[in-house]
Amino acid sequence: MNHYKVTDLKPGLSCNKPVYIDEDTLFIPAGVPIREKDLSRLDKWQVDEVLSEGQFVETQNEDLMNSKLLWGIPSDKELSAIYNETLDKLDDLFNRINQMEDIDVAELDQLSSKLVDTVEDKYIQSVRMVLTHNSVHKAIAKSALNTAILSLTIGFAMDRPRPKLIQLCNGAILHDIGMMRIPEEIKSKKDGLNPEEMTKLKSHPVFSYQIISKELKYEDSIARIALEHHERWDGEGYPQGKKNDDILLEARIVSIADAFEAMVSERPYRNSMIGYEAMKNIISDNARKFDPEILRYFIKSMGIYPLGSIVMLNDSTVARVIKGNPEAPLRPVVITLIDADGKEYPGDMGPVLNLLEKKDMFIVKAVDLNSLLVEK
């Protein structure tokens, strides 16, 4: 048995073997992260060390997401399989594009067609996947996939026809493909970029346009989505300084989706923002960066508290947003994960609360899922 000092333990650590307080008393099973209250329990019992035949490791976010500690969020195995399969295919596709191999665009068309069907069929679950899938692997492919899902939610809210949705999806997937031609030291730099580095970074929409139109030989309407997704409603964007309706509609959609995705995903230079904080940032735009009409569709499709967001109510109930109330965006429909008495409801079995009807209940704050898992 290995002896571990309690002072060396912290929330989030897990062990590959069971951990014991003594030879007969189990502390935590193998693979289960330590919680803050577990350490408090040891302190209360004046336990100085624990025993295990295994080794402690930092629990990765992805492990947390796949664990049984998901606060009642059931795993949609079909959607997870589709998401991960699409992620793998996009990662492979992007690597081949980076190697300048010949690509049959029918391959991407098929992925986009399936993704359109998936988001239409599993809209709420798809948005939740964007907010909770925290793997930092295959970062470019993940950003592309998440941006495509978010773009499609806007496209469906705008009632765009299927051919336009597939075109939108293709453009969203490829919108940042030019980043693969930007030096890695610029993309991963944690400090601020100098003017020369910033100029190089801002050239990626042009690289994207060239890859899509010349290498993949897609039509100009798809290439323009990538070229113009950093243009801004007030004309202060790049690379051409276009404004208002001069910017392609699909590019205006991807612009909002891309901005939101960047806020809720991990980046080398900052931690991710929870969905509510990201939405609050987007809403505060005041028609500077984004088309205000498309922004209204985005808010309508996502809600101020995006679907899947974890929130705390005024009576300390922890719940997950499952449906918005367009007429009262601050009072969505939620499903209880932990009630005011501390009772947990796994597997989506908790009471459903429509806050539009429950006048005495309201959301106090949004909660970061990762910190909630660690603190449980």
Image (cartoon, helix red, strand yellow):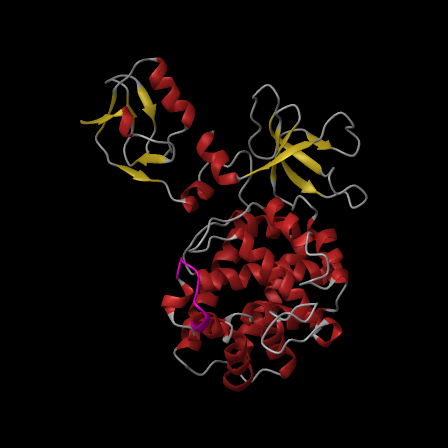
Q: Quadrant of residue 314?
A: top right
Q: Indicate the position of residue 86 as horizontal and vertical percent values.
A: 50, 62
Which residue is at the front of the view, 126 or 291?
A: 291
Q: Indicate the position of residue 44 as horizontal and vertical percent values.
A: 36, 14
Q: Answer above or below: position of 51 versus 372.
A: above
> Which residue ends up furthest to the right in the rendered image?
327
Q: Quadrant of residue 106?
A: bottom right
> Which residue ends up furthest to the top in the rendered image?
45
**Residue at 52%, 70% in the rendered image:** 176
Left of 216 or right of it: where is 336?
Answer: right
Q: Answer above or below: position of 151 versus 108.
A: above
Number of numbered discs overlaid on the protein picture: 0
Q: Indicate the position of residue 320 as horizontal and vertical percent values.
A: 62, 37
Q: Indicate the position of residue 4 as horizontal and vertical percent values.
A: 23, 27
Left of 142 or right of it: where is 309?
Answer: right
Which residue is at the front of the view, 13 or 236?
A: 236
Left of 230 or right of it: where is 376?
Answer: left
**Residue at 65%, 40% in the rendered image:** 321
Q: Quadrant of residue 287?
A: bottom right
Query: Residues in magenta?
Result: 189-196
Residue 69 visible (yes or no): no
Quadrant location of the N terminus in the rendered image: top left
> Which residue ends up furthest to the left in the rendered image?
1
**Residue at 34%, 31% in the rendered image:** 10
Main SS class of the magenta portion in the image:
loop
**Residue at 79%, 41% in the rendered image:** 328
Residue 171 visible (yes or no): yes
Q: Is residue 350 magenta?
A: no
Q: Is residue 192 magenta?
A: yes
